[in-house]
Image: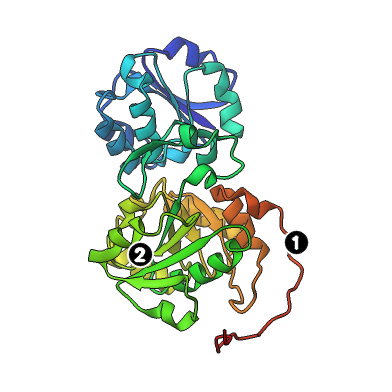
Amino acid sequence: MNVIVANKFQSQLNSLQIDIIKSVNGEFAPEEITEMFANFFFNKMILDITALRGYQNIENVRKLALGIDMSKVILVLDDSDIASSQNYISQLISIGIYNFTRNIDNIPFLIDNPNTYKDVAQYQKIENISGSTVNKHDTAKFEMDDITSSGFTAIVGVKNVTDHAGATTLIYMLKKQLQRNYNVLAIEIDKSDFLLFNDNDMITTSSDKFNNVLKSSNTYDIILVDLNNSGADDACTDMLYLLEPSTIKLNKMIRRNRNIFDFLRGKRIVLNMSLLDNKDVMDFEYESKSQVFYNIPPLDDKKDKHRVLDDILAKMGFARQKRQDLGQESGKLFGIFKNKS
């Protein structure tokens, strides 16, 4: 069942032929909307942008995103100059809001077919690693063949949220999976575990040198970053937040930060080394009031190919991963020793 928060578009929204469990009308502060629906289970929220008090200030939208899972929100924009501006739309996307429309007739479709990042990325302006601002619609006509087209370098940050959730090894496996189709670099910040993989395109650096390393690495299609505790999240064009969903790891995480799922709401949560089945994942989402981007089972890091990794990479927008023959390749089992050149 769905909920409606309406103001200017009240009559049009109430006439939609969709299942509604609750409807409120008026103008509300972000905190008021959060309080109304924080413990209310719903499928989608259809939010009239004019029902958010001070929506012209993007910070009020950010405040709402801290309390509401924006992946469950369909935002109805008005035709004001601010809400129509490219800068405003770009900031919505940066917050993680992809389901927006000015055509109320599109809402029933968006309920069953929500937008992903690839559907709206052409509207986003991104600061590239050289420091200049680019519009992805200008650098690549976004038919979503590939988010790395026309010279755009994708910088994917990976961060452990639970202890030892496997970011380092997952990056190693993602790199092996991607490098069949892309020119890939992996960077590790403030640790030196990458040295153990014997790969010249897996490098280590410190937090204070990270930006310089990025600027000198703009010939790569994709840069995978093991962020550790660096706080360099803002330098990444995409983020994966890893949770190992064992009881002890989750309980330790929550004891450290009881509001962790508020922080993770609307972000790409990946369950890694996970033994959860689909029903378990649904229960996890319900209890945590969050949405899982992908559920990765334990994988053998000695193998070069994993279909599940191609699936998550294609979902992230690396479309060349869709067309893969995952037959076995011969090669060294452990790869402990480098080949002599």
Amino acid under disc 1: Asp
The x, y position of residue 148, in whole percent, is 52, 47
| Residue at the spot 36% in from the left edge and 79% down from the top edge | 192
| Residue at the spot 55% in from the left edge and 65% down from the top edge | 174
Q: Is residue 177 above or below residue 79?
A: below
Left or right: 232 with respect to 142?
left
Amino acid under disc 2: Leu
Q: Could you tell which of marks 1 and 2 lies nearer the N-terminus?
A: 2
| Residue at the spot 48% in from the left edge and 49% down from the top edge | 291
| Label 2 residue SS | loop
Q: Nearer the viewer, mark 1 or mark 2?
A: 1
In space, the residues marked 1 and 2 are separated at their CA atoms by: 31 Å
How many marks the image carries: the answer is 2
| Label 1 residue SS | loop
The image quadrant of residue 232 is bottom left
- Residue labelled with disc 1: 325
Quarter placement of the C terminus: bottom right
Left or right: 76 with respect to 323?
left
Colouring rule applied to residues:
rainbow
Q: Is residue 216 above or below residue 166?
A: above
Q: Nearer the viewer, residue 139 or 105?
A: 139
- Residue labelled with disc 2: 227
The x, y position of residue 37, in whole percent, is 38, 36
Res 287 visible: yes
Left or right: 65 with respect to 146?
left
The x, y position of residue 207, in whole percent, is 26, 66
The image quadrant of residue 229 is bottom left
